[in-house]
Image (cartoon, grey):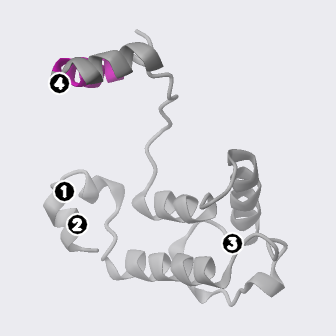
Amino acid sequence: MSPFARYDASVAFLQDLDDDWAALVAHVGPCLHDPKAAREPYEAWVRAIGYQQLTAKAGDAIIARLKALYPDTPSRRLRTSWSPSSTPCAHAVSRDQIATIKAIAEGTLSGLIPPRNVAGTMDDEELIARS
């Protein structure tokens, strides 16, 4: 089975919406997004911050540096006193991004951001209500 087969139902749904969607899907072609293994919500949020306004290559470099400096655990990131001027990411990570990553760590430790196994059992409204 193709790794992209999981998108077949979504493609069919979009094509059936109307002629404009069908034409767009035909123009764009099949979905070639390579699905990655599921991540914990904490890691997904941190990665989203790391990739803000960047090319994928720059985002990859920043995430690799962050992971090397601060292992991917919320408690370690929260306890660490780091700032743009004190890291090798100095010219790539803003104060706001650092504050956001710390807030994500705090939310994960407090339970506001649930682990993947819990988040998977919640409906969208429950997840949104936590934000």
The image quadrant that residue 90 belongs to is bottom right
- Callout 4, which amino acid? Leu
Tell me whether circle 3 and circle 2 mark residues in contact (CB < 8 Å).
Answer: no
The image quadrant that residue 92 belongs to is bottom right
| Residue at the (66%, 86%) spot, across then down | 80
- Callout 3, which amino acid? Tyr
The reply, left or right, for residue 108 in relation to residue 12 is right
Q: Which mark is residue 70?
A: 3
Alpha-carbon distance for marks 1 and 3? Answer: 31 Å
Q: Which mark is residue 17?
A: 4
Alpha-carbon distance for marks 2 and 4? Answer: 26 Å
Q: Secondary structure at mark 4?
A: helix
| Residue at the (82%, 73%) spot, across then down | 91
- The residue pinned by badge 2 equals 128
Residue 67 visible in the current orientation? yes
Tell me whether circle 1 and circle 2 mark residues in contact (CB < 8 Å).
Answer: yes
Alpha-carbon distance for marks 1 and 2? Answer: 6 Å
Q: Relative to 44, does residue 23 appear above or below in the rendering?
A: above
Q: Nearer the viewer, mark 1 or mark 3?
A: 1
Q: Secondary structure at mark 1?
A: helix
The reply, left or right, for residue 16 in relation to residue 75 is left
- The residue pinned by badge 1 equals 124
- Label 3 crowding class (10 Å Cα cut-off): few <14, some 14-19, many 20+? some
| Residue at the (68%, 78%) spot, across then down | 94
Q: Which residues are magenta?
A: 7-16
Q: Nearer the viewer, residue 37 or 46?
A: 46
The image quadrant that residue 65 belongs to is bottom right
Quarter of the image that includes the N terminus: top left
Of the image marks 3 and 4, the number of the one nearer the N terminus? 4
- Callout 2, which amino acid? Ile
- Callout 1, which amino acid? Asp
Q: Secondary structure at mark 2?
A: helix
